[in-house]
């Protein structure tokens, strides 16, 4: 199977062609203001280098920063309303309570509270009132909110009331687009609610982005299925991206970590991805990024959907350097203008790339950087910035390698925090490689009562089989499916012996070839 893997970064857009596990070719192109031109340039360049005809491509896999960028920049967000099923209780902390005002204004966020929701033991707080629910939705719709997020208290224990609300509103107000919190987040009402609101605000943009990529496929004569990469390093269908765009937020660093593990042959390591603007540091275990175990902040909002545990700093190949007191590197970067503005390219701006070339760590450009009396101090600052983050990312004192990837990895020293640095072949395209090799996943989270009818092992097996069926429905090869993670957490606040069982399985993509 021939795959095209694409990763859209803030500075560069990378594309690679892979046949199974064999690397055929790849290229790095500047990210363009309109994004898609850069994607088209990179795919055409990769196909040319790999001597591959577009008709031979079996699948296109894309990792994009469109959605998280829109959220961070407060642009292209749809006006969104939230309906919380919670009354007469569950109103002590109102929706949007911990949100930045700029983000609330960016999406015109509004909310309504109605009767409904569950207690922690699964009993109803109150019954859902269809008339009240419809009236609340009509009020929000009349105020311009065509995107509606629905959150119910303890929807993770029982999600049927959110589903009932969806069915009522779909029938009464079919022009509304609805996001359910139970489809995105985990335990924690506010975090799950926040994730649902963010997702709802991005759905129109997601539809536009997917349509744009489909047009790009036509221009490139790629008559193959298209997938996107998820936060956990697996695949998501284009149709699912339109409904759940938040699942792609952290695909950039995730793709880099997956690609780093694949290119190096190391399934357990620390990964340092040095781009043009930022450096991301994370850990891979069994070839997949370690996920954050607690709630995560996205654009200054607390959420709780799956995200890789990544530490980012404003250091990249394009980071602007001050060589006079006080000495500094970044966080401002020349970004995709590096080939025009860096000193080694006859530009007028001193960058981190210039410092690395001056120190003899790499040979880039067509001009020697200026001689600097502060060079040793600047190199020390740069190395310490990376070393500090590697030390923070380590979860034990076990000696494991550090895999350096990304176009800026040439700036790294041979050792970081006492650990050996490995830069495998094609490491500058690791993010696109990570997209190209992405597998299919199935994740199921379910609360199970362990009693005389079912024991713990049987409950886990039941949830695992459900996850496998989900993966197969997403085009995973049944013969290649393996269990990636299993966890079971006792819920002491529920009557009886209840377990929250989470299972994730992965398998290779199985598609009919051309």
Image: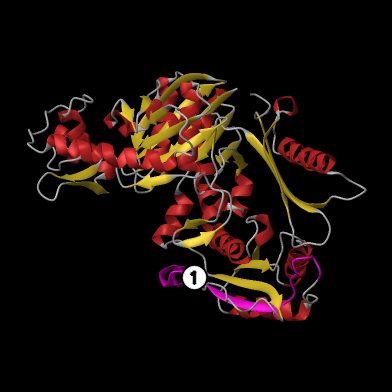
> Position of 423 compared to 174: left or right?
left
Q: Is residue 106 magenta?
A: yes
Q: Residue at left 75%, top 36%?
A: 468
Q: Position of residue 325 (x, y in %)?
A: 10, 49
Q: Residue at left 45%, top 44%?
A: 310
Task: State the residue in front, 384 or 328.
Answer: 384
Q: Which residue is mark 1?
A: 98
Task: State the residue in front, 150 or 158.
Answer: 158
> Quick one: quadrant of the C terminus?
top right
> Quick one: quadrant of the N terminus?
top right
In the displayed structure, 6 sits above or below 277; it is above
> Position of 174 compared to 48: left or right?
right
Q: Hey, which quadrant is residue 37 in on the image? A: top left
Q: Is residue 43 visible?
A: no
| Residue furthest out toward the front | 397
Mark 1: secondary structure: loop
Q: Residue at left 51%, top 32%?
A: 258
Q: Hey, which quadrant is residue 145 in on the image? A: bottom right
Task: State the residue in front, 450 or 410.
Answer: 450
Q: Position of residue 502 (x, y in %)?
A: 70, 46
Q: Is residue 41 visible?
A: yes
Magenta residue span: 98-123
In the displayed structure, 204 sits above or below 95; it is above
Q: How is the image coloured?
A: secondary structure
């Amino acid at each position: 199977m021939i795959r095209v893997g694409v990763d859209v970064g803030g500075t560069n857009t990378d594309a690679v062609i892979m046949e199974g596990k064999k690397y055929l070719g790849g290229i790095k192109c500047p990210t363009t203001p309109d994004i898609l031109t850069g994607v088209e340039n990179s795919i055409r360049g990769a196909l040319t280098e790999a001597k591959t005809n577009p008709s031979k491509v079996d699948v296109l896999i894309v990792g994009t920063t469109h959605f998280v960028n829109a959220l961070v920049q407060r642009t292209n967000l749809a006006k969104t309303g939230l309906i919380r099923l919670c009354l007469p209780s569950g109103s002590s902390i109102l929706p949007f309570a911990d949100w930045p005002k700029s983000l609330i204004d960016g999406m015109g966020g509004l909310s309504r509270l109605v009767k409904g929701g569950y207690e922690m033991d699964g009993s109803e707080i109150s019954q859902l009132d269809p008339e009240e629910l419809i009236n609340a939705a009509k009020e929000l719709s009349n105020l311009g909110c065509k995107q509606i997020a629905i959150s119910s208290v303890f929807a993770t224990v029982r999600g049927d009331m959110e589903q009932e609300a969806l069915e009522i509103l779909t029938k009464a107000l079919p022009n509304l687009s609805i996001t359910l919190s139970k489809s995105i987040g985990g335990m924690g009402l506010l975090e799950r609610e926040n994730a649902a609101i963010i997702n709802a605000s991005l759905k129109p943009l997601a539809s536009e982005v997917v349509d744009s990529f489909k047009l790009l496929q036509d221009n490139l004569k790629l008559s193959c299925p298209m997938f996107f990469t998820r936060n956990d390093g697996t695949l998501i269908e284009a149709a699912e991206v339109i409904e759940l765009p938040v699942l792609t937020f952290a695909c950039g660093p995730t793709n880099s970590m997956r690609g780093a593990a694949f290119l190096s042959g190391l399934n357990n390591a620390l990964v340092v991805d040095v781009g043009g603007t930022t450096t991301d540091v994370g850990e891979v275990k069994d070839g997949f990024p370690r996920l954050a175990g607690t709630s995560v902040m996205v654009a200054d909002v607390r959420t709780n959907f799956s995200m890789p545990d990544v530490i980012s700093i404003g250091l990249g190949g394009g980071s602007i350097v001050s060589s006079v007191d006080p000495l500094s590197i970044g966080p401002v970067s020349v970004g995709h203008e590096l080939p025009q503005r860096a000193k080694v390219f006859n530009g007028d701006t001193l960058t981190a790339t210039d410092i690395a070339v001056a120190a003899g760590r790499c040979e880039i450009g067509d001009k020697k950087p200026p001689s600097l009396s502060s060079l040793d101090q600047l190199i020390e600052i740069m190395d310490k910035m990376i070393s500090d983050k590697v030390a923070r990312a380590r979860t034990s004192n076990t000696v494991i390698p550090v895999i350096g990837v990304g176009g800026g990895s040439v700036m790294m020293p041979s050792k970081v925090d006492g650990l050996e640095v490995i830069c495998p072949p094609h490491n500058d395209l690791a993010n696109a490689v990570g997209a190209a090799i992405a597998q299919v996943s199935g994740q199921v989270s379910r609360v199970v009562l362990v009693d005389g009818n079912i024991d713990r092992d049987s409950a886990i097996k039941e949830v695992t089989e459900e996850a496998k069926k989900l993966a197969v429905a997403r085009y995973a090869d049944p013969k290649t499916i393996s269990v990636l993670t299993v966890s079971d957490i006792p819920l002491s606040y529920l009557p009886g012996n209840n377990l929250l069982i989470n299972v994730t399985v992965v398998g290779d993509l199985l598609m009919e070839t051309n």
